[in-house]
Image (cartoon, rainbow, N blue to C red):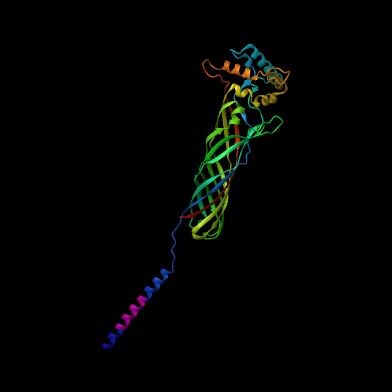
Amino acid sequence: MSRLRHLALLATLTCLGAGTTRAETIEEALAGISLKPTRTLYWRAGYTTLKPNNHNKDVKEVGPRVVQYGDEFTPGLDPQYAQALQLLSNGIRADHPDAYAGQGLGIPDGLSVKARRTSGFTVTMGHYLSDDHKWAVEAYVLGQPFQIAAYGTGRIGGQGSDGVDLGRVITTKALGPIAYLKYTAGHADAWLRPSIGVGGYYIAFFDTRASRTLEDYSGGDTRVHIKNAYGPASFIGADLKMPEGWTLNATLGYLWLKTEATSTTQTDPAKIAVSPALTQSAKDLGPNTLTAIQIINGTTFNTANLVPAITAQLASARTPPGQTPTLGSYTRSIVTQLNPWLLTVSIGRDF
């Protein structure tokens, strides 16, 4: 009996020892497991540069010209100035015998603009779509408005025998979201990971203004409006792992950006009279029109310069009594294919 008790006690101690060993083994196994929190979001803050490619068309008149064929028949016009305008109409008709109606002097051909490079601070946010951090959606969510300046090219950029250099003609601000889906190659912990992506943008233009040189050339107070733009975009980039969980990123993008700018000028007779636009547009119409305007402005036969007096008389005849004389409001437009490159260098981390 005593022997049976000793055997039972030994079995009990053996079981207790085995349980202790098993418990210690589980604790050691758990201690060897490193659990990392799942990080599905990331942010980047950096500096972005936009470089337009400027595939722009020429400026076009929208509607009638400032001074046009048949203005000599304007009611209330002084006869001596009507005779000068008749000379101009005769020249237009001689140059365009089959299409003289609606022809006239205003904004000439060969005018365009070119936007220059601009930069600003930006912040992007991203969301990983897979646990291996290969697929993600990223968007530019914050940033200072891009300050964009456009300069005259062609005949308002000093080009050609009768070109004038207006310098900066338009300033505007641009801001809007840019988002894209991207694929990043390599392991999530790799020190260098290239990426490629496709997406789109919506850009709003605001606080757009004409320069003083453009207003003088156009002939008066000018308001400019640029249509907001949207379209596709493509991106390539690379992430460089840094200490303490930080990531350095470089992204190069291309935006297919097409928009239209429209300017409206309230034409001052005194300003348009001295603008080179009248002589340039007369040259475009043909040699007879150019000769007529040269006679009127006094560069031929030593005649007096009648252009300021004619524009003043024409403005008085067109304006209702009691109002400031004006030749009217005239609109011009230009289609711009900016297609800018976008380069962002940023730093950030996952969270």
User: Furthest residue to the top?
Assistant: 79
Highlighted range, magenta: 9-20
User: Can you give x and y, in whole percent of width and height, for residue 273 in the image?
Assistant: 63, 22
Horizontal and vertical percent for residue 283?
A: 70, 25
The answer to whether 129 is drawn above or below residue 274 in the figure is below
Look at the image and say whether residue 45 sits in the magenta stretch: no
Magenta stretch holds residue 16: yes
Number of numbered tags placed on the structure image: 0
Task: Estimate the x, y position of residue 196 in percent, counting from the top left.
Answer: 57, 51
Asked where in the image residue 120 lies, by quadrant, the reply is top right
Name the residue at 70% across, 22% down: 290
- If the image is split into quadrants, where does the C terminus sit? bottom left
Q: Choose between 14 and 80: the one closer to the eye.
A: 80
User: Where is residue 340 drawn, in percent x and y?
Assistant: 59, 42
Q: Is residue 182 visible?
A: yes
Does any portion of residue 226 appear in the rendered image? Answer: no
- Decide whether the magenta segment is chiefly helix, strand or loop: helix
Residue in front for this viewpoint, 5 or 146: 146
* Image position of 190 (left or right of 282): left
Residue extending farthest left: 1
Picture residue at 28% right of the left edge, 88% below the top: 3
- In the displayed structure, 279 sits above or below 116; it is above
- Indicate left or right for 157 with 323 as reference: right
For the N terminus, give its image quadrant: bottom left
